Image (tube, coloured by chain):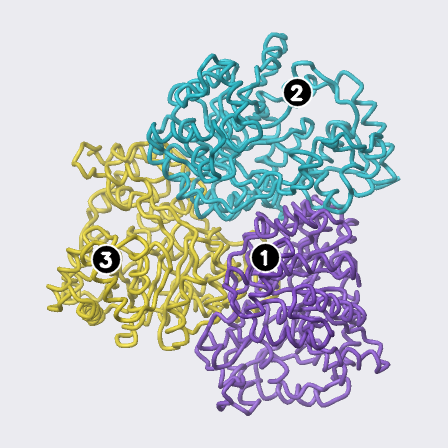
Chain colours: A purple, B yellow, C cyan
Amino acid sequence: MGERLILHEDRLFPIHPEARGVARRLYAQVKDLPIISPHGHTDPRWYAQNIAFSNPTELFLVPDHYIFRMLYSQGIPLERLGIPRTDGGETQGNPREIWRLFAEHYYLFRGTPSRLWFEHVLYFVFGIEKRLSLQTADFIYDRLEEALSRPPFRVRSLFDRFNIEVLATTDSPLDDLRHHQAIAESGWQGRVIPAFRPDAVADPEFEGFRENVRRLGEMTGEDTSDWQGYLKALAERRRFFAGMGATSTDHGFPTATTADLDPSSCRRLFEKARDGSMTADEAEIFRGQILTEMVRMSLDDGLVIQIHPGSFRNHNTPLFQKFGRDKGADIPMRTDYVKALKPLLDRFGNEAGLSVILFTLDESAYSRELAPLAGHYPLLKLGPAWWFFDSPAGMLRYKRSVFETAGFYNTVGFNDDTRAFLSIPARHDVARRVDCAYLAELVCDHRLDEDEAAEVAVDLAYNLVKASYRL
Amino acid sequence: MGERLILHEDRLFPIHPEARGVARRLYAQVKDLPIISPHGHTDPRWYAQNIAFSNPTELFLVPDHYIFRMLYSQGIPLERLGIPRTDGGETQGNPREIWRLFAEHYYLFRGTPSRLWFEHVLYFVFGIEKRLSLQTADFIYDRLEEALSRPPFRVRSLFDRFNIEVLATTDSPLDDLRHHQAIAESGWQGRVIPAFRPDAVADPEFEGFRENVRRLGEMTGEDTSDWQGYLKALAERRRFFAGMGATSTDHGFPTATTADLDPSSCRRLFEKARDGSMTADEAEIFRGQILTEMVRMSLDDGLVIQIHPGSFRNHNTPLFQKFGRDKGADIPMRTDYVKALKPLLDRFGNEAGLSVILFTLDESAYSRELAPLAGHYPLLKLGPAWWFFDSPAGMLRYKRSVFETAGFYNTVGFNDDTRAFLSIPARHDVARRVDCAYLAELVCDHRLDEDEAAEVAVDLAYNLVKASYRL
Amino acid sequence: MGERLILHEDRLFPIHPEARGVARRLYAQVKDLPIISPHGHTDPRWYAQNIAFSNPTELFLVPDHYIFRMLYSQGIPLERLGIPRTDGGETQGNPREIWRLFAEHYYLFRGTPSRLWFEHVLYFVFGIEKRLSLQTADFIYDRLEEALSRPPFRVRSLFDRFNIEVLATTDSPLDDLRHHQAIAESGWQGRVIPAFRPDAVADPEFEGFRENVRRLGEMTGEDTSDWQGYLKALAERRRFFAGMGATSTDHGFPTATTADLDPSSCRRLFEKARDGSMTADEAEIFRGQILTEMVRMSLDDGLVIQIHPGSFRNHNTPLFQKFGRDKGADIPMRTDYVKALKPLLDRFGNEAGLSVILFTLDESAYSRELAPLAGHYPLLKLGPAWWFFDSPAGMLRYKRSVFETAGFYNTVGFNDDTRAFLSIPARHDVARRVDCAYLAELVCDHRLDEDEAAEVAVDLAYNLVKASYRL
């Protein structure tokens, strides 16, 4: 009945015994550190309501675009995976059937981080010691379903068991943060905080932008038909978020373009955004101006700014029309930082008290642009290897390209950036292991003494994250 | 008399004994698998006529631009290497002298894949156990020349000895495939099939395009002065190629640009191509439209489409004028896929029954664009590391950048892509060894169990190639 | 009192004992070879006057933008590091205080090449066996200060002790080379030669370009208000430099753009440069034309041309205004070579007697553009991993991306490219170690025999540098 599933205690460590030994010793110091999760996409409602996850398919497959994009790429229609259609058309409704389909195609995930995360969850969260296959699909499904019905697998119990010290969600300025409010009032000790993600009211090309800006005005009592009122409304929502525990904003614009225009140009641009007469180039500049305004507002409220550029969202137009956003069809693009960030940097680049964390989906920028920028400007720090690069080889490329130029201390440790709550410890564990593997390399070729490597390992796993995100 | 030449049985395997052991075991399962060569540039006449290769210089040097580009880069004139001049000017005519020149400069190839392939051929095909040098040049030349005169070294015998199950050539739509016909009628069991490479009739900037299109009309009886007639003629030639065993087309356009224009725009564009009034930008769009038409035609004939963009052909203008095409002066260019392929993908990207195989000469696109695209669109698969990257380090970079995101099963195994018939087993051997070295890495850091790695090794070497190319 | 500082004899070598053994044997053959330093930025006055370095802070920190950019990136104002302000404003004047600040933040340099170089100097040049920290700061400062006051630490003694066979400085055409003259006349045997760096008179966007061109005219007696006179003046200064021992020129333009215009276009362009009416695009073409003229002049004087493109100089405008050039705010940019170099290559690319050495700050160009170009054109060679990439991982990426395509012999060995005289042996030692580590890899996976690797190691460390720079 299938192969045994064993998560080897030395997984992701170097093969050579000396280096493996160093990696083990370093890892021993970080493996049980609390999890700081400063950037992710889990749903605050889960924690507010202390939900139970309904079934294995709803838990692992339907929300995970890493999983279903792979299955889709091999010709399996999303309907067969139970992904809801925007037109309400029929899709597979039997979660066990979907699970079996996943199991049958499980070999597709060989060599991918999804596989590592999935098996970590099976083994450590659920104690399952069989590898998924068509033969073991029902057995595993049953075991999971049974576990999910029990209290220790409700979200708050898992949060505690996972040793999560703090976790940020990602929230729209139009969100009233009622779930965060409920968490605060519930008496539960878990620290779940919002992050301010204003794309819906800050990107003129976002669906419903004009209506969103109108609602922003309603929520804040500011006149958002006017540039100054609009800025006040944004600042007001930031203050509200900060009051609810937020320490950061997040921006998923297509490029890293920034702008620093005079007020009258801003006003004219905003008028075009408001009346819908904006060109694509103007929208680009508008978003760039917003980034600069966001940093400026941090002078007041201290929020850390995160910039996540470079994704061509919803690249697959027919699929988008049929299934909507976030269906695994976002594709990275070449991204410039050197010229794009200059207006922002000319204004705030030398502010040591502010912090902008940069991410990329264009690895060629690591050594060419990002490490040199972060290794110079007090304002800038580098976020971890992101999205497709949140993987063992992806993280090694990042480390080898970034640390020699920017050092460790212009980076911010790890983000799990996930919607998949159960995979959070798995992702942090992979990150910590790869940290230790990399550091063991430096120790064994005598670039770093082991006592220093041990400090760096703890800093990457814990201290740098807390400090960078002001947590 | 020179150093011994030894091809170590563990070459290209990891150094660490545990990983080396895994690599050996994996390799034992793939080393004797038949060779599937779905993409290459050998001459079908060779197989039709069962030729003997004339002498070592004609065999190894004159057709191999990897070899003479290196010698040329160090200041050796192509005339001294016997490369024919387009003006018929004098060149070295004594093959032994050329061979000696090669031997004298053999040190230039240290660390290159050419060296690996060449020594594999010497050792395994000809049983020569001396390293090439000025001292051993004559000895080796004599041994090779003697062997080449004997029947076991005629091309069909070698084809059988090499255990080639199927080999594709690359052919113009204007080719009557008489050599493929002759092979079919000869009673020889070797499977040599054509591939449809229409650049000469599909790229308005190809030398002689207009005349070529006229001849295409003659061959097919279609009116190729008209867009619809031209498309019919292309479809007709594809059907003819498919009837002769072809399973794929191949396109070597400078970029990956695609287009999906309405019929009247196509017609107007074609008229400009036909009367020679086309601008460079229009030619680019025309080629992009052709790619989309090619995929559309696959709905009928099932051919797999290969796109090989990104080479600046004949970059060295003075050299091109003196010696013509394919003289080692093609230089890779930065290549965009995300925006370039969108028109094609919007139309056919979700067709699970069709297949487009993408290649690149821009490694920065592996992780940023190609793996994410192939890991999502049912239409797309990734070809192997191409041309300059068909090398041990090149293949490792490919694997480490691609497999974590696209998995193994959105790739298509290995292509040898060579004109150098004798090097085919050498190239497949290098590829299989690097596959096993990479997989051994995954096994030893416990990302993949060895039973699965063994399946993947066989899939990469054999099953995926057959399936992807429908062979 | 702090940790012991030990520079392990196997630092930067592979971990596996077999590979380490090979690396050790290779390194034993190169470690004591004389240093050839064909490209660097030390001050010729030092050698002319046989200076003593004043104190540890002046020696290690103030001139080293690698060091203070890292400290600055973490919020330490340049004023506190004693960097002079252009407005003469106050800065920290106590070198010991600055040293303590450095020591306190020494952990920032973990994993960086600056750390490797610094500790090499402490240990091998000064015999210090303590790691820098706040605890050891004064002890080390005192030891260094004491040593610097003694004759063995004057620059000529160190030059001899470092076994430097030849060292090039970088000099403006407007420099009268009086220090080089003084060195020549001093009777000291050290070979210190100039290199011709004409940016100040060749880049219309350089500060003071017009005045500089006027002075060029004065120095040479040519009419530099005229294109032909200007060219004659440049040629004349090149001849003068060559007479003083120079064997190379160097060009730090923002891009690799070249041009090959007809004389009347050149004349018109030069007129615009001269009267200050030039656009940015025209300045770009002008610089491109200069590169072509520089290569043409090498037909006469034999100088090797070095092209160092891709740096966005003084990216931090406020910092530039306050502290001037070279303050760690130069940021690499994406750089094209394939189209940019074509005009130059069409004219001189096939000249085997000339030599252009290319550098890059855009690693994505290594395998895509630079190795294929250098592996074909007789004119071109590749310089070593530059600036931010002069680091262990940076050099390995270079080797793995370049050597398979261009071979070893289209590259030129190592440049230290430094202003930090004391770090020269450290930098060459790191380079030689990484060479040996890389070659050991090739030997151990049986791509290269050890006798050949030993030859290559010596070629990279010594022979190729001398030959490529005609030293």
Which chain letter matches label 1? Answer: A
In the depicted view, which residue is nearer to us: C112 or C442?
C112
Q: Nearer the viewer, mark 1 or mark 2?
A: 1
Q: Which residue is mark 1?
A: A256
In the rendering, which numbered label is found on residue C159? Answer: 2
Q: Are marks 1 and 3 on the same chain?
A: no
Structural distance between the alpha carbons of marks 3 and 2: 65 Å
Vertically, is A298 above or below B68?
below
Helix, strand or loop at mark 3:
helix
Q: Nearer the viewer, mark 3 or mark 2?
A: 2
Q: Nearer the viewer, mark 1 or mark 3?
A: 1
Say which residue appears at 82% left-offset and 35% top-offset. Answer: C98
Which chain letter matches label 3? Answer: B
Lateral position of residue C32 relative to residue C101, left or right: left
Q: Amino acid at mark 1?
A: Ala
Structural distance between the alpha carbons of marks 1 and 2: 47 Å
Q: Which residue is mark 3?
A: B157
Q: Amino acid at mark 3?
A: Ser
In the depicted view, which residue is nearer to us: A92 or B430?
A92
Helix, strand or loop at mark 1:
loop
- Number of residues whose C-alpha sits closer than 10 Å to that of mark 1, classed few (under 14), some (14–19) or many (20 or more): many
In the rendering, which numbered label is found on residue C301? Answer: none
